[in-house]
Amino acid sequence: MGNRKRVAERRKTPPAVLGGVIAVVVGGAGLGAYALFGGGGEDGDGTRTSSAQQAEEARTGPLSAAEVTDAADRFLTAWQQGKVSEAAEATDDPEAATALLTGYTKDAHVEDVTLTAGARTGDKVPFSVKGTVAYRDFTEPLAYDSALTVVRRAGDGEPQVAWAPSVVHPDLKDGDKLVTGEAGTPPVKALDRDGGELTTAAYPSIGLVLDGLREKYGKSAGGEAGIELRVVRGEESKKAEASDRTVLELSKGTPGTVRTTLDPKLQAAAEEQVAKKARSSVVVLRVSTGEILAAANASRGFNTAFQGSLAPGSTFKVLTASMLIEKGLASVDEKHPCPKYFSYGGWKFQNLDKFDIKGGTFRDSFGASCNTAFISQAPELTDDDLTKQAQQVFGLAKDDWQVGVSSFDGAVPVQKDAPMAASLIGQGGVRMNPLNMASVSATVKAGVFHQPYLVAPEVDNRTLATASRTMSPETLSQLRELMSYTATSGTAATAMAGVSGDKGAKTGSAEVDGQKKPNGWFTAYRGDLAAAGVVQAAGHGGKTAGPIVASLLKLGDG
């Protein structure tokens, strides 16, 4: 390895004491500027500083450019020199900073660190990190970008770095740490359904799925672990089902092989589609089996397609409609109320742009996505009717899906009064993701619930989730008719215009507190394909998520 400069882990001598007070460097290294803090004792000239004088001298107001750059320089210089205590004291959480910065050398084995500050923007300072990861006989250069924010310290207003684990590395969250050593889990080579390798170079958004596959199958797929610098997740990240991540590979392990159900043509098309719209996600399923053929997210930081927990808006009316038909509260061609407003449980509900349908049928209400047509049936329902329908018919919200990687199988809690009514239109406490809503369309098309999966259950003898019952033939026929009508003559018609064959769809717009535009949802099927997508904070689903879903359905064989 040659001679490597060692980085000091901790300052071993106390700060200089001058005249009974502590002298602390407040500028960058080598600037020779000192400030004296008496802590309420005698000043250097024998006078006492009163608390009133200290309060008057406390810094307030917006941070100046000099304060931001000086605070950043103080922190970065100490960290670069290996002076962990000094770097930690330059933050607003010295204890947490000490632990992570100490681990940067001790656990991550990063040496010869060079930190270069970039141009300040307000209170934020970006910086680049370069160093060497050295473990046993292995060394590899390390380089990445990070950023810090400067804030005023409570009390005296002194500028300090706002501590966050992401300052050390952008992938770190509270409780996470960087560790170099033998990877606990061997790497995996993930294959598509045709045997081609799945890589982030070919499929940019698939990184989180690959991490999940390694975590699930690395030890059983026949590989051997290598030496890696990894982000090891803490308890909070594990609660959010975040997987450990490889930052740098020092020696290659021998990967095992895991075959997935992803279709290379559909996956490539899904990647292309989400790249066009920020905060978009989509999933495509094979109706007859539940196989996941494509899954993509515009964001690389979270797998919204599988793990998102969002109100699905009016796409959830597919499930609600099945329940109303079963209970005899609605029928395709029977008259059904769609007033401008309907009040229930103390809330006043309305339709988009306050429209109403006079003398219309349930088909008209479903195709136009009339909220009050569904809310008006709340007085006829018990609090747990919707939850039972979701669990018993659509296999949702039981927390028992075994997809092959971490996933969320929806939430449809038992609610009462106004929140129960709101749940009927996919608001209230209902939470879904594109995987869940693609499954809803697949269940309608197949007539039976097939739990979605990314890795065949035979690989590890998993037991897939099931639903306890199916819809009656009459209910199923009416539900398909409603979705078909919406795809050809309702709110989904524009998006589905170029999709041929046997098709059905439902649009959705989900309101989110503090968000100007709703999340746009779309779920649909065509032949043996079902798909669903969401574009967050973008507007109506027919115009946002609809084109994404429709473009993927067109690639199917019908």
Image (spheres, rainbow, N blue to C red):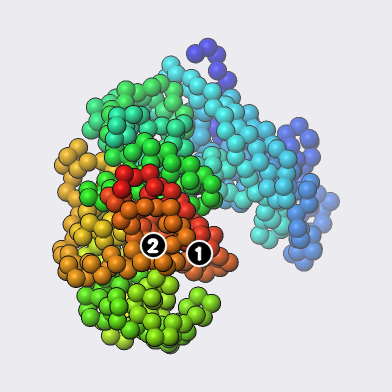
Compare residues 315 and 97 and report the one nearer the observer: 315
- Residue 153 percent across, percent down from the top left: 67, 56
Indicate which label's residue lies in the foreground, 2 or 1: 2
Label 2 is placed on what type of residue?
Ala
Tell me if label 2 and label 1 are in contact, CB under 8 Å: no
Q: Position of residue 283 (x, y in %)?
A: 37, 50
Residue 171 in picture, x, y percent from top left: 50, 42
Sequence-wise, which precedes: disc 2 or disc 1? 2
Q: Residue at x 23, y 67 (%)?
A: 477
Reading the image, the residue beneath label 1 is 540
Q: Position of residue 130 (x, y in %)?
A: 60, 28
Callout 1: helix, strand or loop?
A: loop
Q: Residue at x 31, y 72 (%)?
A: 320
**Could you tell me if residue 102 is visible in this image?**
yes
**Residue in the foreground of this view, choosing between 499 and 285:** 499
In this view of the protein, can residue 435 be seen by the observer?
no
Work out whether 424 lies above or below 340.
Answer: above
Q: Amino acid at mark 1?
A: His
Which residue extends farthest right?
45
Image check: 511 left or right of 30? left
Please give the name of the residue rendered at 57% of the width and 26% of the height, measured from the top-left corner: 131
Q: CA distance from mark 2 to mark 1?
A: 15 Å
Q: Which residue is mark 2?
A: 487
Circle 2 residues within 10 Å: few <14, some 14–19, many ≥20 = many
Residue 387 position by quadrant: bottom left
Q: Nearer the viewer, residue 374 or 169?
A: 374
| Residue drawn at (33%, 57%) of the image | 503
